Image (cartoon, rainbow, N blue to C red):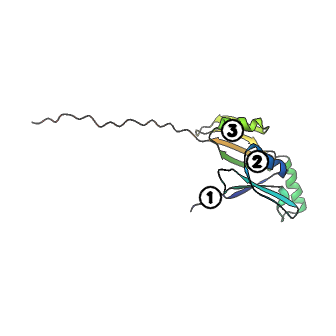
Amino acid sequence: MNLKLSSCALAVHDVDEAFGFYRDVLGFEVRNDVEAGGTRWVSVGPPSQPDVQIFLESPGADPSASPADRQAIEDLTAKGLMGHRLVFVTDNCDATFEHIEAAGAEVMQEPINQPDGVRDCAFLDPSGNMLRFTQPRQVNRVVASRQPPATRPMAYT
């Protein structure tokens, strides 16, 4: 079985604010910007992964949710209590951290080396969704030089 992630959805309390963050701070491309049935959703994704979409949608976008449920979800999202987590790979955790911090994002964790060998950091997006940025472990392999075994003179008796 070969599975690939195609899309995911994040509840955001302000689609325009979230859209600006993902586009302007993270450099994501716009995949879709749709208004239908009184709701709006935008999908974005990293330029290096054109087949991946992250849907930014208001929490009340689900047509099966009752008005009371929509209000409850919107209230929890506005407080940052409905946050989800996305993990991105970066080739330079420290530079990524500096860039996102300079844009004013809320820092959850400064860059640290984790026990499993990765270096990562974390932020909250404007709606309280956690974004982790991880730099894969740098594997330093020492390759032993392979020399042919020393030859011994053959003893003939």
Q: Work out whether residue 109 can be spotted.
A: no
Q: Work out whether residue 123 can be spotted.
A: yes
| Residue 59 placement: quadrant | bottom right
Q: Position of residue 4 (x, y in %)?
A: 62, 58
Q: Which mark is residue 23?
A: 2
Residue 73 located left or right of residue 6: right
Q: Which of the marked residues, 2 or 1, is nearer the chain's N terminus?
A: 1
Q: Residue at x 70, y 37 (%)?
A: 97
Residue 66 located left or right of residue 91: right
Residue that mark 3 sits on? 96
The amino acid pointed to by label 2 is: Arg
Total tally of numbered discs in the picture:
3
Q: Which mark is residue 121?
A: none
The amino acid pointed to by label 1 is: Lys
Q: Residue at x 88, y 51 (%)?
A: 75
Q: Which of the marked residues, 3 or 1, is nearer the chain's N terminus?
A: 1
Q: Is residue 34 above or below residue 102?
A: below
Residue 157 located left or right of residue 113: left
Give the secondary structure at mark 1. Answer: loop
Residue that mark 1 sits on? 4
Q: Position of residue 92 (x, y in %)?
A: 63, 38
Q: For marks 2 and 3, give the CA distance.
A: 15 Å
Give the secondary structure at mark 2. Answer: helix
Q: Which of the marked residues, 2 or 3, is nearer the chain's N terminus?
A: 2
